[in-house]
Image (cartoon, rainbow, N blue to C red):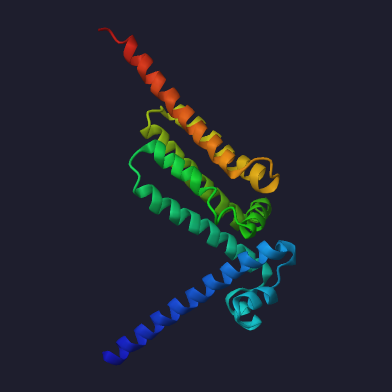
Amino acid sequence: MRASEGTQEAKKDEVVHQEGMRFRLLASTLEVVGQVGLENLTIRRVSESAGVSVGLVHHHFQNKGDLVHKTFVYLIRRVREQLTAGRRGILDPVERMKFTADMCFNDEVMSSGAANVWPHMWSSSAHDEGVQRLCTAFSRRLRSNFIYDLRQAGCDQTMATIFAIQAMALVHGLWIEHRVAATISLDEVLGVFHGVIDNATNQSWKQSMRKLSALPH
């Protein structure tokens, strides 16, 4: 029994080690892409950045395309996990929405590496079903969060859906305006997004007040 338990523990340690190395290589990929751009990314550059052999990188990733794809998956999962953990502790629906908006523009998402990887993978979803599924699942989850919060804030289902679609358009549009076109600052991005959230919830509050005032006294 003890020998068997020792073998199992050794296997668990190996899995943890492998996962740790994979995350290290993904982080190095983002760092390299941020420095030289996606078009100049190579397995060798990633290995040098991570301080490991080229063979070790190939052990975890088939080629450059696989490495970029796994980096995109890593980014999506990181944002999703941070959103889930952070939203769980916020009771006020308006503050939850603002937290969600902030997470869409946090340092990791706005980094130079992500700025290269993220739009590349979104555009490749047109001919890559696997990437399309990831993008679709992420967008649906994000929109569902906005709809839930808007409903909690007093919007009916129709208005909550409309406002959530507008919020999703802001996520993509403001990201491009700030990170790609560089026409607005990050403070302006968050100011606009928070303002839209306030406007949407204030409208629902005004509608509720009108309904109350129309009731017979």
Q: Residue furthest right?
A: 40
Q: Position of residue 14 (x, y in %)?
A: 44, 82
198 or 149, which lies in front? 198
Q: How many marks?
A: 0
Q: Position of residue 54 (x, y in %)?
A: 65, 81
Q: Quadrant of the N terminus?
A: bottom left
165 or 201, which lies in front? 201
Q: Quadrant of residue 48?
A: bottom right
Residue 39, above or below 138: below
Q: Residue furthest top?
A: 217
Residue at 39%, 23% (x, y): give it.
Answer: 205
Residue at 41%, 19% (x, y): give it.
Answer: 206
Q: Position of residue 5 (x, y in %)?
A: 30, 86
Residue at 58%, 38% (x, y): give it.
Answer: 188
Q: Quadrant of the C terminus?
A: top left
Residue at 53%, 56% (x, y): give it.
Answer: 76
Residue 63, above or below 97: below
Q: Residue furthest bottom?
A: 3
135 or 75, which lies in front? 75
Relative side of 57 to 83, left or right: right
Q: Position of residue 195 (x, y in %)?
A: 51, 32
Relative side of 84 to 132, left or right: left
